[in-house]
């Protein structure tokens, strides 16, 4: 019985590896890659899907599920991701005066806050680390769902809180968004121009973090406006 259970775990892990490394992958390709009968592969993939370890796309192909992404991001947060992002978050908070959050996709339809650097304004967003927010209607949710426009950032006013505007951009590992970096700003302090200035600045930072995460050179880009330059409200906040 023990050997049978161990064999089932080995098969499930082999399928999970195939879905994560080669995904999105069809059932037949997953079975062929792991040398399993299609019926066995289907049974195990359904179990993994029910637990949130794999997910099916609109075409029925299997890829990483929300739970495996969350677990990977949680492990990365302890060992690497927070440490990687901390200096950039500190710089953003100092330059803009606004609170900076790092978040990842949680289980189900949520995002979870992993880390914060609080802003320097007397009125600022304080720590929500460990709390979850819904994906629907939030800037972090749009980013983590890969719903990012060509500008490279998402801005949502009154998404999670009525008096807060969230500006968010993706951190990517190759082609997949693994985290979101957000500026949370009291809505009275932003207008369209300042939102754009903060969004462009934030997108540059996350592009650099993504390049460092994947070990590839960052794309050439214009330098961030210096405090005291063309961003009067941002400069004042620093």
Image: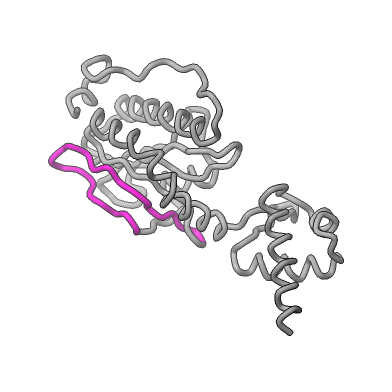
Counting from the top left corner in percent of width and height, residue 169 is at 44, 36
In the displayed orientation, state which residue is furthest to the front: 3
Q: Quadrant of the N terminus?
A: bottom right
Front-most of residues 24 and 12: 12
Front-most of residues 66 and 83: 83
Counting from the top left corner in percent of width and height, residue 95 is at 25, 28
Task: Give the main secondary structure, helix, strand or loop, of the magenta stretch.
Answer: loop
* Relative height, residue 217 to residue 135 (above, below): above
Q: Is residue 41 left or right of residue 171?
A: right
Kindly identify the residue that appears in the image at 26 percent across and 52 percent down.
127
Q: Quadrant of residue 67?
A: bottom right
* Relative height, residue 223 to residue 234 (above, below): above
Front-most of residues 164 and 173: 173
Q: Is residue 147 left or right of residue 93?
A: right
Q: Quadrant of the C terminus?
A: top left
Kindly identify the residue that appears in the image at 71 percent across and 55 percent down.
62
In the displayed orientation, state which residue is furthest to the left: 122
Counting from the top left corner in percent of width and height, residue 15 is at 73, 60
Q: Quadrant of residue 134?
A: bottom left
Q: Is residue 123 magenta?
A: yes
* Relative height, residue 148 to residue 160 (above, below): above
Counting from the top left corner in percent of width and height, residue 236 is at 17, 25
Q: For the magenta stretch, what is the residue range? A: 108-130
Kindly identify the residue that appears in the image at 39 percent across and 56 percent down.
133
Q: Is residue 54 magenta?
A: no
């Amino acid at each position: 019985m023990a050997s049978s259970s161990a064999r089932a775990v080995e098969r499930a892990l082999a399928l999970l590896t195939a879905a994560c490394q080669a995904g999105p992958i069809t059932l037949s390709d997953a079975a062929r890659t792991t040398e399993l009968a299609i019926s066995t592969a289907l049974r195990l993939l359904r179990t993994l899907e029910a637990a949130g370890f794999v997910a099916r796309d609109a075409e029925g192909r299997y890829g990483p599920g929300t739970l495996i992404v969350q677990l990977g991001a949680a492990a990365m947060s302890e060992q690497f991701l927070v440490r990687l992002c901390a200096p950039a978050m500190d710089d953003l908070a100092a330059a803009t005066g606004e609170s900076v959050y790092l978040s990842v996709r949680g289980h189900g339809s949520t995002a979870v806050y992993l880390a914060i650097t609080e802003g320097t304004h007397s009125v600022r967003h304080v720590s929500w680390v460990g709390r979850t927010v819904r994906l629907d209607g939030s800037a972090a949710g749009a980013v983590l769902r890969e719903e990012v426009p060509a500008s490279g950032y998402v801005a949502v006013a009154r998404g999670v809180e009525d008096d807060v505007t969230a500006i968010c951009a993706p951190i990517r590992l190759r082609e997949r968004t693994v985290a979101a970096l957000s500026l949370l700003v009291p809505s009275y302090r932003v207008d369209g121009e300042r939102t754009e200035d903060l969004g462009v600045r934030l997108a540059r930072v996350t592009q650099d973090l993504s390049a460092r995460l994947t070990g590839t050179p960052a794309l050439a880009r214009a330098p961030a406006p210096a405090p005291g330059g063309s961003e009067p409200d941002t400069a004042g906040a620093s």
